[in-house]
Image (cartoon, coloured by chain):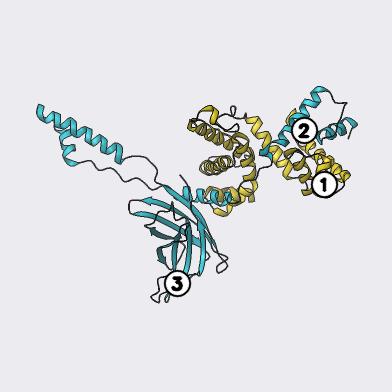
Amino acid sequence: MSASDNERIAYLSGEPVESLTPQERAELDELRALLEAPAAWEEPDTGLEDRVVAAIAAEARGPVAAPAPTKPARARWRLRRPVLAFGGLATAAAAIAVALVIALGGSSTKPLQFAMVVNGTSLAPGAHGSATLTKTQSGWRIELSATGLQHLANGRYYQAWLKNSAGILVPVGTFNDAQKVTLWSGAPVTQFRSFSVTVQQANGNPASSGKRVLVGTAHPVH
Amino acid sequence: MQDRDLRARFRQGDPDAVREIYRSHGRLVYAVAYRVLGDRGLAEEATQQTFVKAWRAAQSVDERRDLGPWLAAIARRVAIDVYRREAVRSADPLESVAPGDPALVAAPQSAEAVYDVWEVREAVAQLPADEQEVVRLQHLDGFTHTQIAERLGVAVGTVKSRSFRAHKRLAAQLGHLRE
């Protein structure tokens, strides 16, 4: 490498160098500015990877379709058969009402949705999956898909839970196999964001066994 | 063949494929987003949106296309959208806004400028750990060689050697940026 290259490197590394031209100095200062930019060094939060995976999993499942709007039958009849002037006024009002129903009922507003990656605990280290949590009129629908958990039967089953920051647990459903499960929560996911699955025994005790096999944290998608 | 299989699994939303692509390109996408937005939370949001958009578009992207520049282009557009959203949202009186607030920052970086940070990020990541540490302390934290030597508990000459080697590698890899 030529002496001038060594001088450029020395300047870049912070050594005082007098032999550089103003243009060389300006070019190297630009490169130093890039090295000084926080963007060249900042690391994202370690949880971002899980959030990206969960967001794409939610996209892959697709959004919940808004219910098709239903037009009132009387209004539809009136739109087809306007006859009298008096009836014409009623027809116009009905048309407006129908338009409002279509506009409001057929809204393309996306439902509130969370997503999460779920991972196995030391009791089930090979378990892994994802879930989407969608707010509906009936409550929060949780669609879980996980592999690595054995099928349970003969009095043993899985129980899913949501927990809030105060440690309050709410049960959201029981199942035997985690590959494709739909669970429901009456508690808001916006507050109950810690998810877990425990192994339970059908012995009349509804409390959590504490034997957690799957855990995850819900994050908003949109 | 492996790369084609990875892309196919990514298009299908395979979580393992998503992780693999995130691990190879996530930091770079984040660097581009951070370069535009200057805020960790917003840059993470933009990074997440970038990978979602990349997944949506994965069906139509040419398999031969290099993923890196493609993701960088998406990241820049997403970050600019986030920047504009935040600029519109900020309705505080001017004197109450912090100097670094995105609403006050000049127009987002050009495509060349944000891709430059991608290349710098990649070059820095390839440095040996001891050299990377010296470069970081020097450029990001603004320490002199003497101060770095004191922090690391090594001789000043060792710091200077590491710094020279590191910058020689960086100059070789990044010299084209200034052409």
Distance CA(mark 2)–CA(mark 3): 62 Å
Of A161 and A51, the residue lying toward us: A161
Confirm or deny contact between disc 3 and disc 1 (CB under 8 A): no
Confirm or deny contact between disc 2 and disc 3 (CB under 8 A): no
Q: Label 2 is placed on what type of residue?
A: Gly
Distance CA(mark 2)–CA(mark 1): 31 Å
Q: Residues within 10 Å of mark 2 (few under 14, many from 20)?
A: few
Residue identified by numbered label 1: B150
Q: Position of residue A36 (x, y in %)?
A: 72, 36
Q: Residue at x 46, y 57 (%)?
A: A164
Residue identified by numbered label 2: B175
Distance CA(mark 3)–CA(mark 1): 57 Å
Residue identified by numbered label 3: A200
Q: Position of residue A133 (x, y in %)?
A: 43, 53
Q: Residues within 10 Å of mark 1 (few under 14, many from 20)?
A: few
Q: Quadrant of residue B96?
A: top right
Instruction: Write down the colour of chain A.
Output: cyan
Q: Name above or below for residue B103 compared with residue A197.
A: above
Chain ID of residue with mark 3 = A
Mark 2 vs mark 1, foreground winner is 1
Q: Label 1 is placed on what type of residue?
A: Glu
Q: Residue at x 39, y 58 (%)?
A: A185
On the question of residue A9 being in view, the answer is: yes
Chain ID of residue with mark 1 = B
Element marked by disc 3? strand
